[in-house]
Image (cartoon, rainbow, N blue to C red):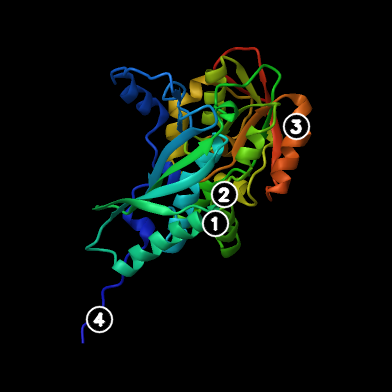
Amino acid sequence: MTTPTPEPRLTSLSHGGGCGCKIAPGVLSEILEGTAAMPVPKELLVGIETADDAAVYRLNDEQALIATTDFFMPIVDDPHDFGRIAATNAISDVYAMGGRPIFALALVGMPINVLSTATIGRVLEGGASVCRAAGIPIAGGHTIDSVEAIYGLVALGLVHPDQVKTNRGAQAGDVLVLGKPLGVGVMSAALKKGHLDADGYARMLASTTQLNTPGPDLAALAGVHALTDVTGFGLAGHLLELARGAQLGAVLDWAAVPLHAGVHELAQAGLVTGASGRNWAGYGERVDLPGGFAAADQALLTDPQTSGGLLVACEPGSVAAVQAVFARHGFAAAAVVGHMEAGPAGRLRVA
């Protein structure tokens, strides 16, 4: 009787996991710089101008279509959990535009000579379970035989054209509110090296599979001016996108930023992702750090967040309403983390 060959750990099949797989921001800018400009129809409300979370196309006076896609290599070894995390991350971009998802398409690349059909099926079922929780079907998709395991979704949603929230609408004096703690990238690095305990894994999974459902309710608040989600470029990178889009400066109160339990100690031990360093290399020259800012804090500032939290820019008088929305949706760690200021434009100052 032949003994079946054990399947490898999913994370061993990928050179990077989750949103840490993203092309570094500086390299991405160089790539996109060489692309030819395309004619833009007036119905396209949001395109690639400010690296927003999704494209938005006006259908009529009451509806605009949100379209986005996101996929990556495994961040965890459990195939069902991998599918759940990837699907949650992809759908998040619909919520980040203020919309509600309506259906999804699956994107699947798997090494079929390495992983069993049962394992691949568990990845897909994990993604389907999140779509059921979001109240949407997976209506189709595409599969390929791939060297590395890849899974994600094309996610489509609807939003009223007047309630589209972008990453470029912030105003001077706006308060910044972050919906989830930081540290998912550090936790994933610790997991891959065998240094994340069961409690840490449970916290990581709870965070990365929590759908950013506050998005539509936040978009309906008149005092909310800009909305995005914090993913592969880290908190600093997405704050810089807000600042660049609005031609303002961003100020971050680092002591107020919520962190997952234990991640600071893991970062101090050097358990950080390569993407954190690539992020800093891509935009660090536009970040002003205080004297003595620790290397572990810098790593967390640039830590790639897979399925990270929503980042809101709102007028000061709306902070209580924003926090109430987060609380109503079960985001207990949501916190005020900074503000926007008149200048210098496109820079982040860490206080």
Name the mark nearer the viewer: 1 or 2.
1
Q: Decide: marks 4, 2 in contact (CB < 8 A)?
A: no
The answer to whether residue 295 is left or right of residue 178 is left
Query: Viewer-proximal residue, 226 or 66?
Result: 66
Q: Which of marks 3 and 2 precedes in the sequence?
A: 2
Q: Which of marks 3 and 1 precedes in the sequence?
A: 1
Q: Which of marks 3 and 4 precedes in the sequence?
A: 4
Q: Position of residue 150 (x, y in %)?
A: 34, 51
Does residue 253 appear in this view? no
**Amino acid residing under circle 2:** Leu
> Under tag 1, what secondary structure?
helix
Q: Gap between marks 4 and 1, in whole Å?
A: 39 Å
- Seen at 56% across and 24% down, the residue is 242
Q: Which of marks 1 and 4 precedes in the sequence?
A: 4
Return the residue at label 4. 3
- Seen at 48% across and 46% down, the residue is 102
Return the residue at label 1. 133
Name the mark nearer the viewer: 1 or 3.
1
